[in-house]
Amino acid sequence: MNNNTEEIIKNANIQKIAEDGAKIYEAIRLQYEPVQNGKFLAIDIESKNTYVGATSSEAVELARKAHPNKVFYVVKIGFSAAETLASLGLNSL
């Protein structure tokens, strides 16, 4: 991660992103499930724009092209939040 990315994350309200992102995903998930299960969805909680990628990195990269200075809610389509964290290797946070 570069310093700019670290600074963006440091200044983000991660709790709000997680709560709002989960609500947005719940409202739109049937647009993606089950056809795109296993792919990743990055959500900009302010615009509610979504970006689908085969990996979490790909989804975030697409999202950053449109919103370079944001932190995104990322979910694995068709999986619970805990399963998404485990697949991202973040379950120890």
Image (cartoon, rainbow, N blue to C red):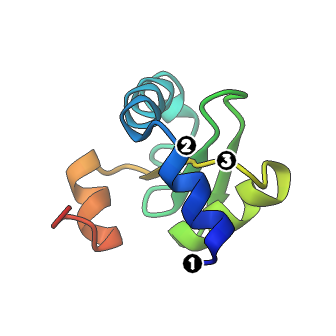
Q: Mark 3 or mark 2, which is nearer the start of the sequence?
A: 2
Which quadrant holds the C terminus? Answer: bottom left
Residue at mark 2 = 32
Residue 13 placement (x, y as % from top left)? 46, 36
Q: Residue at x 39, y 37 (%)?
A: 18
Amino acid type at circle 1 is Met
**Residue, x 60% and y 31% (percent of image)?**
45
Of the numbered discs 1 and 2, the one sitting upstream in the chain is: 1
Q: Would residue 89 appear left or right of 20 to someone viewing this image?
A: left
Q: Which mark is residue 70?
A: 3
Extreme left residue here? 92
Side of 39 where 86 appears, left or right: left
Residue located beneath label 1 in the image: 1
Of the pair 40 and 1, the residue shown nearer to us = 1
Among numbered discs 1 and 3, the one appearing first in the sequence: 1
Callout 2–callout 3 Cβ contact below 8 Å: no
Q: Eyeballing the image, is 92 above or below 29? A: below
- Please tell me in which quadrant of the rendered image residue 60 appears: bottom right
Figure check: 40 above or below 19 = below
In the displayed structure, would residue 89 be above or below residue 67? below
Residue density around tag 2, few if under 14, some if 14–19, many if 20 or more, within 10 Å:
some
